Image: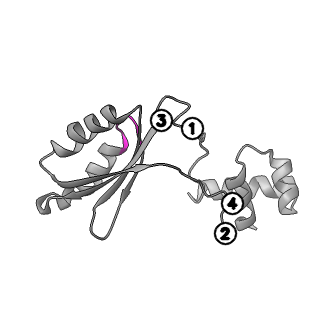
Amino acid sequence: MDRILLAELTRDARQTNNALAAKAGIAPSTCLARVRALRGSGVIRGFHADVDPALAGRSLQAMISVRMQGHARARLEAFMRHLAGLDGVLNVFLLGGAYDFFVHIATSGTEDLNAFVIEHLSSNPDVAYTETNLIFQHARATHWR
């Protein structure tokens, strides 16, 4: 039952409880209790607006790969939180593998992207290496299975 609710909420988090209950084949009171339980347990972390960066004035998106210096390993989580709070950052992923982070950013153009990389990454002594990849298209998954 919870998987059905998650799938439906992933498709449209703004639907009414009655509509969600009907799609799941349960009573509205049961649906409300299940969704509250999913929120309370942290499975559902929140409901968010899906903003189109281009229409909001940030038409250039990039994924920046970041490798940290060996001495900075103890500060990875703090650095991740710092990056997530910066203007234009959409997502920050802490990784295992060749890179320590992927930073998904939306900017108004190449000048702002260049300034971000220099100001927040290249000038940081804890950052060993960055690689910037432009994002031409993006499709958000619309299901949860």
Pointer 1 local density, CA inside 10 Å: few below 14, some 14–19, many at least 20:
few
Please say if the residues under marks 2 and 3 sit with CB atoms less than 8 Å apart. Answer: no
**Label 3 belongs to which residue?**
59
Observer-nearest residue: 12 or 140? 140
Disc nearer the start of the sequence (2/3): 3
Question: Which residue is at 88% across, 63% downward?
Answer: 25
Residue 132 located left or right of residue 20: left
Disc nearer the start of the sequence (1/3): 1
**Label 1 belongs to which residue?**
52
Quote the CA–CA distance across marks 4 and 2.
Answer: 8 Å
Residue 22 located left or right of residue 46: right
Amino acid at pointer 3: Ser
Quote the CA–CA distance across marks 1 and 4.
Answer: 23 Å
Within the image, what quadrant is residue 10 found in?
bottom right
Q: Which mark is residue 6?
A: 4
Picture coordinates of residue 132 (x, y %)? 31, 51
Residue 26 located left or right of residue 44: right
Disc nearer the start of the sequence (4/2): 4
* SS under mark 1: loop
Say if 77 sits above or below 50 in the image.
below
Amino acid at pointer 4: Leu
* SS under mark 4: helix
Within the image, what quadrant is residue 90 found in?
top left
Disc nearer the start of the sequence (1/4): 4
